[in-house]
Amino acid sequence: MPALFSDADLVRQPREIYPGCVHVPGWLSMNQQRFLVGEFFRWGQTTPEREGISRGIPPHSPEIYGKKMSVRLTSLGWHWSDYAYRNDAPEFGGAQPFAVPDWLQRMGRQALDAAYQPSTAPSWPAFDGPQHAEWVSSYCPDVALINYYAPHASMGMHQDKDERSSMPIVSVSMGNTGVFRAGNSENKNMPFEDILLASGDLIVFGGPSRFMYHGVPKILPDTSPAELNFPEGRINITLRQTGLSPAGN
Ligand SMILES: O=C(O)CCC(=O)C(=O)O
Ligand SMILES: [Fe+2]
């Protein structure tokens, strides 16, 4: 059995886990985290079926292989249902998702810039100042998936492969620390590495790691920073460029 987490997790420095997969601990300030938690509650109330339910925590748990996920999900840009991005998902009663706000798209570009620096990502991408800047500025995520993990929720190993674009996945987390399992691109099994994603952490996976298997086997209770005032559970936001919208590619 691999260790649940490694000594590297105790050194809270940006780290290239694999080529293209970079963890940046403490990337979001406490103010940014608080703002995102506020938006999380607002986004959770976007459709009629959700109104008044559990303080805005998304009530929708998608089915995967006929089994309900323990994670609750809402999204911006497109609904995600039955392994596809769509705007007609019946479980949302015809309600359209919010658009991905400009500031969140900018956050995505800033995340790529922060993660893919020569010091944090020595293996990928190959750096050329202007080309790197152009690549970062072309990132235009048109979907945000908003996951809520109650303390006992988990997410099985999977690939993010419903997008038609191979632009990177940008992921930020708030609340309780989650154990993030970063696997290989071949299958759900070893080799993989378990990384602790704490409140405010960023992880980006693109390039040769874009289709790595990953999952969240465990949430660590009582690990949310007191200043965040979000004591129970974990919020994860992933930004994706689907290649479906006219604006995306
Ligand atoms: O919660 C996480 O850190 C990962 C979420 C994820 O893999 C997904 O939404 O596809
Ligand atoms: Fe994923």
Image (cartoon, grey):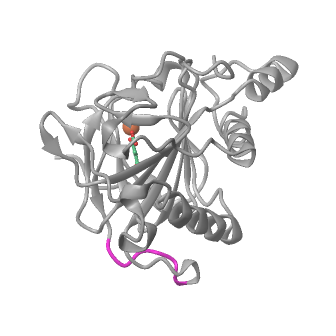
- Name the dominant secondary structure of the magenta segment: loop
60 horizontally vs 32: left or right? left
Residue 89 versus residue 164 in the image, above or below: below
Which residues make up the magenta segment? 221-226
Q: Is residue 168 magenta?
A: no
- Total residue callouts: 0
| Left/right of residue 98 with respect to residue 208 in the rendered view | right
Residue at image x 60%, y 22%?
245
* Residue 83 x/y as whole percent: 31, 28
Q: Is residue 241 left or right of residue 45?
A: right
**Rendered position, 126 above or below 153:** above
Regarding residue 58, the answer to whether it shows in the image is no
Q: Position of residue 164 (x, y in %)?
A: 49, 15
Q: Residue at (67%, 40%) from the top-left corner?
A: 108
**In what quadrant does ligand 2 lie?**
top left
The answer to which quarter of the image holds residue 183 is top left
**Does 244 appear above or below 145?**
above
Q: Residue furthest left?
A: 66
Q: Residue at 46% across / 25% down in the picture?
A: 209
Q: Is residue 143 visible?
A: yes
User: Quarter holding the C terminus?
Assistant: top right
Residue nearer the viewer, 89 or 81:
89
Q: Position of residue 98 (x, y in %)?
A: 58, 46
Question: Of 107 and 61, which appears nearest the observer?
Answer: 61
Q: x, y (%) of residue 12?
A: 56, 59
